[in-house]
Image (tube, helix red, strand yellow):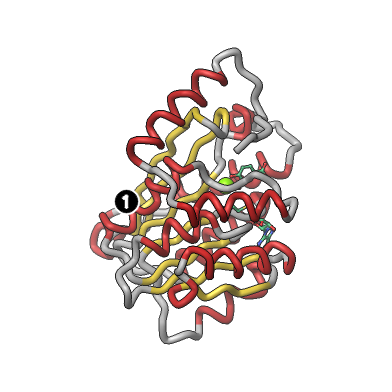
Amino acid sequence: MARVPDYPSPNAEKWLAVDTYFASLLAPHDAALDDVLAANQEAGLPTHDVSPAQGKMLALFVAMTKARHILEIGTLGGYSTIWLARALPASGRIVTIEASAVHADVARANFDRAGVADRVELRVGKALDVLPSLEVDAASPFDLIFIDADKPNNPAYLDWALRLSRPGTVIIGDNVVRGGAVTDPDSTDPNVRGVRAFLERIAADPRLDATAIQTVGEKGWDGFALAIVKDVDEGEKG
Ligand code: SAH
Ligand code: DHB
Ligand code: MG
């Protein structure tokens, strides 16, 4: 899938070739996943889906944590949702939140295509409007939370993630590199400011243990933050 890198690099072609090689071996597409990306393109959706190798990584996180209840903020066409949903046991569920009704319609058709519609609960609306309704659900807390929507709201999404979590819950935040601008404390870019506030809040929260990993590949220079909610005793120790 052609993408527009936010950080032009002379190595971008090599990054793509290596990503394509890794994905061909370890994260190959079936026909449904090909059809999903084709449907997204047909509908004119932005190519902001995770890469195949990243989708596989999300699936491995589900397996490693034995997650049964997943929350995703930012569905787009549901490509990441499908990787996450396929890694769930049959009784598992993923709630995914999407603000755009257009994106949500594409995603809904994609869930049918990929055979995961029975495991996916798509909530259409701005995440900050939808999240409060999840708090009162008996189905909370979530075992794994993937934050991948509008970056300026990342600090608020982190607060909600903590509210909807338990000790052991894994929280992943996508796209934290911002073409390297994440290191700029004076940036006026609301995405950069959102990502920096998100990372700083993670770092300062005694309930969380975390890292951030920068990546190269078909999405250019990118990266994600990975956090786990500590056991209560550990959190109290700080
Ligand atoms: N997780 C997807 C990519 C998500 S792209 C994947 O990897 O396949 C980010 C999505 O967040 C877009 O579809 C955008 O419409 C949605 N979004 C933006 N602001 C939002 C908000 N306030 N609440 C919910 N979704 C939002
Ligand atoms: C952007 C958003 C994403 O979720 C992503 O994976 C890549 C890029 C963006 O807003 O530029
Ligand atoms: Mg993303």
Q: Position of residue 47 (x, y in %)?
A: 65, 44
Residue at x-position 47% and y-position 32%: 214
> Mark 1 — residue?
60
* Quadrant of the drawing holding the N terminus: top right
Residue at x-position 52% and y-position 58%: 158
Is the C-beta of the residue carrying label 1 under 8 Å from the nearest atom of ligand 1?
Answer: no
Q: Position of residue 42 (x, y in %)?
A: 71, 52
Report which quarter residue 27 is drawn in. top left
Neighbor class of circle 1 (other Cα within 10 Å; few <14, some 14-19, many 20+) is some
Would residue 132 be visible to someone looking at this image?
A: yes
Q: Position of residue 56 (x, y in %)?
A: 38, 47
| Front-lying residue, 206 or 222 | 222
Would residue 27 appear left or right of 156 to someone viewing this image? left
| Count of marks placed on residues | 1
Residue at x-position 68% and y-position 43%: 191
Q: In the figure, 68 relative to 171: above or below?
A: below
Q: Position of residue 188 (x, y in %)?
A: 76, 37
Would residue 87 appear left or right of 185 to someone viewing this image? left
Report which quarter residue 235 is drawn in. bottom left
Ligand 1 lies in which image quarter? bottom right
